[in-house]
Image: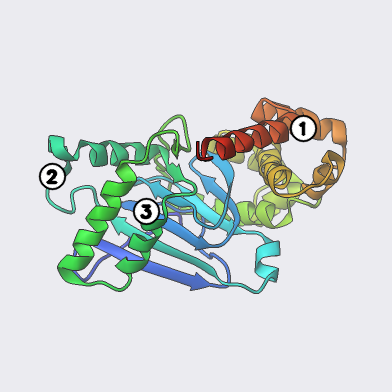
Amino acid sequence: MKVIFEHQSNPSGEGFLVKEYIQRYFTSPFHFHDVHELIWIKRSHGKLYAGKNMMNFQDGDIYLFGPGFGHCFYNEKAFIELGEKAHAIAIFFRSDFLGTGFFGNTEYVNIKEMLDKAGFGLHIANGPGHLYDLFGSLTQKKGMDKLVTFLQLLNEISKIPPTRARMLNETQSAMKLTNKDSARLEPVLKYVMENFRDELDSKTAASLIHLNDAAFCRYFKRRMEQTFSQFVSSVRITHAMNLLLTEDWDVLRICYESGFKNLSYFNRQFREITGQSPKEYRRSFQQSKEHLIMDNQSD
């Protein structure tokens, strides 16, 4: 059985560990570490379950998760069917890898504040190109050059303003779970992620973890702080949000493509989760995009 805790050891003694993942799709279950994780999604897209929230992820995204922050990247079937490889570079490190109190120095306050915010999860979209270069070079360098490059990467990310380095949760989301809990949860999350376009029911989910329906619903709500149906809706709405911004489809088609069978119910769920109707959500993005284009125009 897969477990929720993944320890990252570093036999090299460098104080941080760099891993490059190139695989058909991301395979880690819903998990957390006892260290920070800084990860660049070089090539992949799908759904990210981060802390207590669900969102889309795509090429170029950068995430920083603090110790105990539960997360999982799920590739959609559409990506897997493309036949391309999921590609990511991740760095695992302790906040004191340079010694206790190092980042407490006032000259490094930006990095310390960034690491503190990692307990909420941080997301950086469309980062400056030189960040990607630093990530890539870490897989090639050794010794002091590698350490200097990593510190440069942390420093550059810490300078990104809050408007571009978004916190993923309103409260810290440290996971304090047993391996037994995590082993139960993983098949249910996978079942929803892979089949959200189809009919889903709590009885099937319950059978995956060998509980009856009533016991499963109580367990799931206590563990996830939401009902099973609420979780399914959040996955479907997250998918719909992505389609609204990337496809020129009408709302009815997006409703069906996201697993909803009724347009009025889809509209109610979308507004409940996002605070906007699907059309308002698409319109607000188009307006903000036009504004950004105008801001980038030369005088």
The residue tagged 2 is: 102
Q: Secondary structure at mark 1?
A: helix
Q: Residue 69, image x and y in percent?
A: 41, 45
The residue tagged 1 is: 279
**CB atoms at circles 2 and 3 under 8 Å apart?**
no
Gap between marks 2 and 1, in whole Å?
49 Å
Q: Secondary structure at mark 2?
A: helix
Residue type at tag 3: Leu
Q: Residue 49, image x and y in percent?
A: 55, 47
Q: Is residue 288 left or right of residue 8?
A: right
Badge 2 local density, few (<14 within 10 Å), some, or many (20+)? some
Gap between marks 3 and 1, in whole Å?
35 Å
Q: Residue at x 45, y 47 (%)?
A: 70
Image mark count: 3
Q: Residue at x 70, y 63 (%)?
A: 78
- Colouring mode (rainbow / by chain / secondary structure / one colour): rainbow
Residue type at tag 1: Lys
Q: Secondary structure at mark 3?
A: strand
| Frontmost residue, 129 versus 167 | 129
Q: Earlier in the sequence, mark 2 or mark 3?
A: 3
